[in-house]
Every structure is written in C-alpha cells, then in structure tokens.
Image: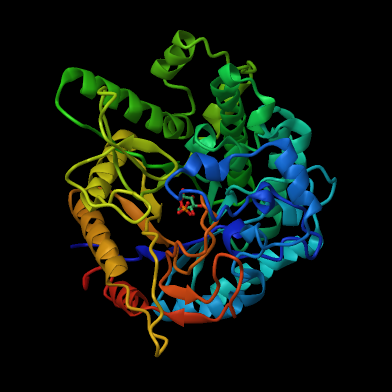
C-alpha cells in the first residue's frame, strides 16, 4: 500500500465539542451552548436530540449551569490544549483539524471589531501546534454560529448573515495568515437539511412545516455564496493557501437491483453530491435546479450570486465518512439510523451500538467516486466509531473494536490510493473523547485518548491512552504500512 510521502496523518475536533470555557474571555453564546443532553431519549432517534424552539433557547439561556448543556464544558480543551497537543504529537500527528468558534471572535456576530482575547487564543493554539510539528487544518464553521444571529435573523435564512460570516473569516485570515495554510469553510454543508438549527441556526418552530425544505435550501444557498466569497478572500490574503469544502459522504446503495430502487438510490446520491458540485464547479447542477422547480421550491438568488460562486471554487474536496446507507422504495424495508439519517438497513453490514452501519469498503467506493467526479485532491477529515469504553482496574482501556474499525478503513483508503485516487491526508474523528454532536453524550467515545468525564460532567478530566493510541502511533510511524 502506498500512502504518498508527506501524507498528513492526524485527527479532527470541533471547538464546540472540546473547548468548553463557553462564557470566558469575551466569548458569546453559540447555538451549541443551548444543545441539550437528553438522558432518557433513545440515542438512535437523532431528530429528538437536535430538536429546538424559542422556548427551549430562552430556558437554556436562563440557566447558567452546564450539567444539561455539555458543549458548554466540552473536555475543557481551552485550558488543556497544551497537554492534548503533546499527546497528539506523541502519536506522530502531522495534522490536526480544529475549528474556530465564531463567538470567541465576534460574540454576537455583529460587532464592528473582533474580540482580541478570542483571536489570541487561536494564535497561541496554532503556535503550539507548529511547535509540536502539527499542521493546522481549520474549519471556519462547525455547528457553532452565534446564538444572537439565530434568534435575530433565524440564522442563515437571512442574507445579512453572509456579511457577518465574511467579516469573521476575513479577521481570521488576516490574523492567522502566517500560521494556517489549510482551511475548510463549512463543516458538512449538506447537513442544513438534516439538523437546521445546529448547522444554520434555523429555529424550526418559526417555519411552517410545508416551507421547511425551501427554508433550508435558502439558508444553504447563503452558505454556498458565503463559502465562495471567503474562498476568494482567503486566496487573496494568504497566497498559496488551500481551501476545501467538506461534505458528509453519505453513499447510498440500492437495496435491490429493481430499477425503482436504483432510481431512488441515484436521486439520493445526486442530492448528497450536489453541495460539493457547487463548491467545486461554482454553479448549481441543472438536475438540482429542476428538482427545486418540480418540488415548488423557490430559492431567492441574486443576479450577482452566479459570478460569486464561480469566483470562489475550492482547491480540494474533503469529507466525513462514517457509514453507508441503503435505499429501497419498499415502505416495509427495515430501517436503521446513521449519522443524522435514517435509511434502509443493509443486511451485509454490522452496526455500532448507535445503529451506524460499519462499511470500510464503502470508504474506498466513496473516495473513488469523489475523485472520479471532481478530479481534485481529497482529504478524509472525519472517520471513526463511537463506542462505550471500559476502564480496567489498572486504568488501561482495551478497545480492539476501534482498532479494527480503523484498520479496515485505512486499508481501504490505501487501496483507493493504489487505484489512483489523489489524497492529501486523513484526520480521524476524534483523536480524543469529546461531546457527541448529535446526542450530546460523553459516553459515545471516539478517541484514542480517554477523558475522565461522564455524561453529566462528573470526572477529573484526566487524559489517558487507550490501546488504540499505541496502534495509531505505529500506523503513522509506518506511513500506513503497518496496520
Ligand atoms: C460529524 C460531525 O457529522 O459527525 C461531528 O461533523 C460529529 O461534529 C461526528 O461529532 C460524529 O457524530 P456524533 O453525533 O456521534 O458526535
């Protein structure tokens, strides 16, 4: 297997899931700070976990505590990052994907000037990464927009949010131009449709049900325009910078070869790819515009948007990859949850405790498909398995299931490279245990590094190495040869 020389190996996290310190040094509340841990809700029912309305936001903001708002505390990376980076460096990381919390820089999104303390935190973080030989890959928007923009404008539905975001990104490019070369604009830009509040600050109870889809596409259009604007700005401010898009790669297979199943599957896959199409080609695919027409969806686009999209095409394509889904027109087909989706179960695949189907070969399939379609370098910037870990009496944590998951996925990624796919790097989700995006659980653990904290926030926050830590270290040291 031939991972290219200089291939980036590492891990990925998001500010709102690790940093904590939600209200210190001038940070404003973000949409993540009102996301609630719901202990008695089925973990496979993602819709209940991500539900949101104005009453809930008001109640959350009146509650200064973090017990039921775990993203307020994260794993306190804000104060532990030096120790954590040392552990990442010990594993041999050459890249770490982090995001910048918009509300540390512009607490409500509308201030005229950035918050210096927020800017300084990330300067220090990036400096420390470089000190440890770790290249930053920075996401500008990862489920953490200012809550103030959500409540005032209903998030990205309002076009004025584009300028707020562009101002935030401009401040980041100016400040970090000597520290950060690799950027991503929107994490899983396609997810607006699946969790509108988390991704785009849309408060669903404000939108009539029959207008929800149209509203999501409107917000999405604003994000696509904003993304193109900041790609251009980044290229101008940081010559040689590389800016990518980030897609939830939700590859769907047909449950049977019945033509109706195939057609339904094709529609799903085209829908999943269209977001990256716009980022890469700078225009909406005709089939998607026709789909809007057929469904009576009217998306307000300004005449100048076409030129903006064309002028801000991305340099590379990145994706998260956790599982694949299956599609069938049979209403009785058995269903299973995946990453904020509910699809038809694939009888050939095992699943995690959260119902996500494990499909390493699907990663190879997805990478080949993406490369063939876009002919752009790829990065897998999230891949991993949420699991319950057990700490033994002597403090050790044996996680062979995680090692096996990664062994198989990395092996398939290597095969895709051997088949000709151009790849720059791979960052696992997540190298250290953190708060789950969908369920707000701590006990859904992803890391090579264990963090002593339970779902209610009890624990010392001490970090310890799982068995998988030593395994990934060996993989990186051998540039993917020794799996
Ligand atoms: C991705 C998100 O969709 O999936 C991450 O970008 C998220 O933020 C990851 O954490 C895993 O999902 P979850 O719900 O298990 O945390």
Give residue 5's quadrant in the image: bottom left
Q: Residue at the location (77% across, 61% down)? A: 23
Quarter of the image with the N terminus in it: bottom left
Q: Is residue 140 visible?
A: yes
Q: Residue at the location (17% across, 45% down)? A: 348
Q: Position of residue 255 (x, y in %)?
A: 20, 31
- Which of these two is toward me, 61 or 214? 61
Residue lying farthest to the front in this orientation: 40
Left or right, residue 212 beside residue 146: left
Q: Position of residue 242 (x, y in %)?
A: 50, 50
- Which of these two is toward me, 371 or 15? 15
Residue lying farthest to the left in this orientation: 257
Give residue 98's quadrant in the image: bottom right
261 shown above or below 8:
above
Left or right, residue 89 beside residue 262: right
Left or right, residue 45 beside residue 255: right
Quarter of the image with the C terminus in it: bottom left
Q: Position of residue 426 (x, y in %)?
A: 37, 59
Q: Is residue 186 visible?
A: no
- Which of these two is toward me, 68 or 8? 68
Residue lying farthest to the right in this orientation: 112
């Amino acid at each position: 297997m031939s991972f290219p020389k200089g291939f980036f190996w590492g891990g990925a996290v998001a500010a709102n899931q690790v940093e904590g310190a939600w209200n210190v040094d001038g940070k404003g509340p973000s949409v993540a700070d009102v996301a609630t841990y719901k202990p008695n809700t089925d973990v496979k029912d993602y819709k209940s976990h991500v539900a949101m309305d104005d009453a809930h936001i008001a109640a959350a903001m009146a509650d200064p505590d973090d017990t039921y708002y775990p993203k307020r505390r994260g794993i306190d990376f804000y104060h532990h990052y030096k120790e954590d980076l040392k552990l990442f460096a010990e594993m041999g990381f050459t890249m770490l994907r982090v995001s910048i919390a918009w509300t540390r820089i512009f607490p409500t999104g509308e201030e005229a000037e950035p918050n210096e303390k927020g800017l300084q935190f990330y300067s220090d973080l990036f400096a420390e990464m470089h000190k440890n030989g770790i290249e930053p890959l920075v996401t500008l928007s990862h489920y953490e927009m200012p809550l103030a923009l959500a409540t005032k404008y209903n998030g990205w539905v309002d076009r004025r949010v584009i300028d707020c975001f562009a101002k935030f990104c401009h401040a980041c490019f100016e400040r970090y131009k000597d520290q950060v070369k690799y950027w991503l604009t929107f994490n899983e830009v396609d997810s607006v449709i699946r969790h509108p509040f988390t991704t785009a600050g849309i408060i669903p109870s404000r939108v009539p049900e029959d207008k929800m889809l149209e509203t999501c596409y409107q917000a999405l259009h604003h994000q696509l325009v904003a993304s193109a604007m900041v790609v251009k700005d980044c290229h101008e401010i940081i010559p040689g910078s590389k800016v990518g898009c980030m897609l939830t790669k939700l590859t769907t297979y047909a449950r049977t070869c019945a033509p109706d199943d195939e057609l339904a599957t094709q529609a799903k896959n085209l829908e999943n790819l269209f977001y990256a199409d716009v980022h890469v080609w700078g225009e909406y695919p005709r089939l998607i515009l026709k789909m809007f027409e057929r469904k009576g969806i009217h998306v307000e686009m300004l005449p100048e948007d076409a030129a903006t999209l064309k002028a801000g095409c991305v340099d590379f394509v990145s994706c998260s990859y956790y599982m694949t889904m299956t599609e069938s027109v049979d209403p009785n087909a058995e269903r299973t949850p995946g990453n904020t989706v509910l699809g038809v179960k694939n009888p050939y695949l095992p699943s995690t405790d959260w119902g996500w189907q494990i499909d390493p070969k699907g990663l190879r399939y997805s990478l080949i498909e993406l490369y063939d379609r876009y002919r752009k370098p790829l990065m897998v910037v999230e891949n991993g398995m949420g699991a319950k870990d057990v700490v033994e009496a002597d403090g050790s944590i044996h996680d062979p299931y995680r090692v096996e998951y990664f062994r198989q996925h990395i092996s398939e990624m290597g095969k895709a490279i051997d088949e000709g796919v151009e790849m720059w790097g791979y960052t696992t989700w997540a190298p250290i245990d953190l708060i789950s995006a969908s369920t707000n659980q701590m006990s859904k653990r992803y890391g090579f590094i264990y963090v002593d904290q339970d779902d209610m926030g009890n624990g010392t926050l001490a970090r310890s190495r799982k068995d998988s830590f030593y395994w990934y270290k060996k993989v990186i040291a051998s540039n993917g040869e020794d799996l």
